């Protein structure tokens, strides 16, 4: 028997799996439900496995079906990548580069990356959680992601990443809290603080600093958005922790006061997929970009 796969059948399966029903897939593909059902059965026969189970009148992927969907996403993602890359190579305009930025990355750092991409390309930027961004990177929906931690995926054949920034963190507050500068860090005992999400690496480092200094603080806010912490600090609502470069204008104009440096560091990582066809702008940034 010839060892080949009907990719029309695989595409139909992918759309059925992503929509969750034959009727929805039929509308998208403009193929009759009976024809879709028949071609899905042909794919299952070819693979030798059942891909869906019916549960309460819904199509639910089997374990093999989920694995097949992962492969299908990879296969069609590579096809889209090929078209994008060839289109960029033939076009006279700038190369399009898809960039993902993790929630919580300082704005000045994200701006530096996007600005560097604009020198040679046309960046499109999206924000999201680290896991979702890395998933999009692996599926070739993104060219680069800027993250607060090195990607956890262990498969070095899939991802390449490098540290592009590591800077100390400082405790900062409005002039109303300038008195906390004296006797720092013990002066933070009982002070109102604005903190990043409990899941972030630098939240862990700041809490370790509190533990080592035997400090009990009054946590007033937890957020993944640095700008919210900065704006509330400007209003005198508490102490927050950030790289000095993120607030240099407010420090220079004395809207914020540096209370002291904390033994914690903010790292940023730039990651990209190891691709068969390379986005030239993404490749250059992975090689040369740093903050």
Image (cartoon, helix red, strand yellow):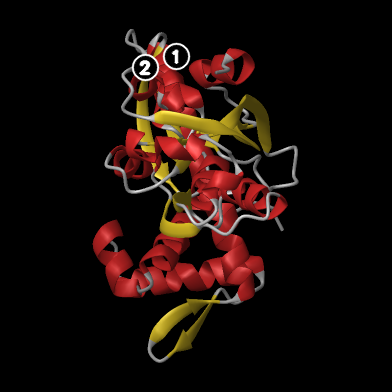
Compared with residue 1, is residue 52 higher up or lower down, i.e. above or below?
below
Q: In this view, does 31 lie above or below 288?
A: below
Label 2, label 1: how many angstroms apart (C-alpha)? 26 Å
- Establish if 255 lies above or below 289: below
- From this viewpoint, is residue 163 visible? yes
Does any portion of residue 80 appear in the rendered image? no
Q: In this view, does 86 lie above or below 233?
A: above
List the residue tagged with mark 2. Answer: 252
> For residue 286, which quarter of the picture?
top right
The N terminus, quarter of image: bottom right
Residue occupying image coordinates x 49% and y 45%: 133
User: 266 left or right of 26?
Assistant: right
Residue 228: % across, % down: 33, 44
Q: Nearer the viewer, mark 2 or mark 1?
A: 2
Q: Which residue is drawn at 62% across and 30% down?
A: 275
Asked which secondary structure carries label 1, the reply is helix
Image quarter in which the C terminus is found: top right
The label shown at residue 128 is none
Say which element carries label 2: helix
Work out whether residue 196 or residue 240 is closer to the camera in this orientation and state it: 240
Closer to the camera, 162 or 90?
A: 162
State the residue position of label 1: 116
Residue 238: horizontal and vertical position, in percent?
A: 38, 47
Q: Residue drawn at (29%, 63%), measured in percent from left and top?
A: 31
């Amino acid at each position: 028997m010839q060892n080949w796969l009907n990719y029309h059948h695989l595409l139909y399966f992918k759309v059925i799996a992503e929509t969750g029903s034959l009727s929805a897939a039929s509308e998208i593909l403009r193929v009759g439900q009976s024809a879709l059902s028949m071609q899905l059965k042909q794919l299952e026969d070819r693979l030798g496995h059942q891909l869906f189970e019916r549960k309460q009148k819904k199509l639910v992927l089997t374990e093999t079906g989920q694995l097949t969907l992962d492969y299908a996403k990879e296969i069609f993602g590579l096809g889209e990548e090929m078209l994008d890359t060839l289109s960029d190579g033939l076009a006279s305009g700038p190369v399009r580069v898809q960039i993902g930025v993790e929630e919580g990355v300082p704005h000045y750092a994200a701006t530096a990356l996007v600005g560097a991409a604009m020198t040679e390309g046309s960046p499109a930027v999206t924000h999201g959680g680290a896991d979702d961004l890395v998933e999009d990177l692996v599926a070739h929906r993104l060219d680069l992601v800027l993250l607060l931690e090195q990607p956890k995926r262990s498969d070095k054949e899939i991802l390449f990443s490098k540290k592009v920034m590591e800077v100390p963190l400082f405790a900062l507050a409005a002039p109303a809290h300038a008195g906390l500068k004296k006797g720092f860090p013990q002066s933070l005992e009982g002070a109102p603080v604005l903190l990043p999400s409990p899941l972030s690496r630098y939240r862990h480092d700041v809490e370790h600093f509190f533990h080592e200094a035997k400090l009990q603080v009054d946590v007033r806010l937890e957020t993944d958005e640095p700008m919210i912490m900065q704006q509330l600090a400007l209003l005198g609502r508490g102490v927050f922790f950030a790289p000095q470069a993120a607030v240099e204008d407010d420090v220079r104009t004395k809207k914020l006061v540096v209370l002291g440096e904390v033994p914690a560091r903010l790292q940023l990582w730039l990651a990209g997929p190891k691709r068969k066809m390379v986005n030239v702008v993404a490749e250059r940034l992975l090689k040369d970009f740093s903050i």
